[in-house]
Image (cartoon, rainbow, N blue to C red):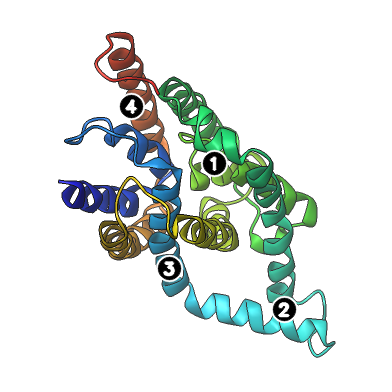
Amino acid sequence: MDFLNAVILGFVQGLTEFLPISSSAHLRILGEFLPGAKDPGAAFTAITQLGTETAVVVFFWRDIVRIIGRWARSLAGRVPRNDPDARMGWLIIVGSIPIILLGLIFQNAIESTLRSLWIVAIVMIVFGILLGVADWVGAKNRRLKDLTVGHGVIFGFAQALALIPGVSRSGGTITAGLFMGYERRAATRYSFLLAIPAVFGSGLFQVYKSIGEPSVYGPLPTLVATVIAFVVGLVVIAFFMSYISKRSFLPFVIYRLALGAFLIVVLALGIIPAN
């Protein structure tokens, strides 16, 4: 049964990672309804995110290779420091600092207290409202070429909020980008690129920690879940990048509010435990 649960969770991870609805919240909630009813844990979530983040690397491979190459050459003076791709390399580094620092400082809380379903429910609703407001009032006239170091730091802190299940890594950064006036597609693209160092760092760290330690799901189920997350995630990225070029985030806002309200009801009725 654990193997089947891991497969289901891997599919959900791939389906929800790139949509602004929080994959970690979905894995946390779903774990309470699957046979055996148990929280898959922060480690399982971080490791399966390696699959979805590999999908980002595959989808944006040409961009990533170009950014790394021109950033490296800018260090040697072979490319101007203000080259757009070289700047993007620095902006991804700067934007990754907040989540690294806060992830280390609040590691214990992230793996325990912040996984309370009451917190997840409230955060789902609050950040759903913020996403809706940002999408409504945002000017949407800035592109990635307008990205500054200051904006990169703000994006970074918005990404760090995703350490709380329910915020959503893409949702938090996209919301910040919309409030700062970035186009939907530009905010989303930077969000996906910005996540690469943080997710790989967190996932690989959890793999290292899990060696020789008991886990909610064994190594093989977790590996299968990660592969499934990669395949599903690749499809979702292609869909989402096309979707946001033409449509608003309203359906995702409504979904977040509905899921948050549903979670509050089932918690209040004692159908599932909060912790």
**Residue that label 1 marks:** 162
In the image, residue 196 sits, relative to residue 114, either above or below, namely below
Q: Considering depth in this image, is 274 or 63 the residue closer to the camera?
A: 274
Q: Amino acid under label 1?
A: Ala
**Residue that label 4 marks:** 259
**Residue that label 2 marks:** 71
Q: What is the distance, in whole Å, between disc 3 and disc 1 at their CAs?
A: 19 Å
- Judged from this view, the residue extending furthest toward the front is 212
Q: Considering depth in this image, is 125 or 134 the residue closer to the camera?
A: 125
Q: Amino acid under label 3?
A: Thr
N-terminal of the pair, mark 3 or mark 1, is 3
Q: Nearer the viewer, mark 3 or mark 2?
A: 3
In the image, residue 124 sits, relative to residue 204, either above or below, namely above
N-terminal of the pair, mark 4 or mark 2, is 2
**Residue that label 3 marks:** 54
Q: Amino acid under label 4?
A: Leu
Q: What is the distance, in whole Å, between disc 2 and disc 1 at their CAs?
A: 27 Å
Q: What is the distance, in whole Å, between disc 4 and disc 1 at their CAs?
A: 17 Å
- Judged from this view, the residue extending furthest toward the top is 269
N-terminal of the pair, mark 2 or mark 1, is 2
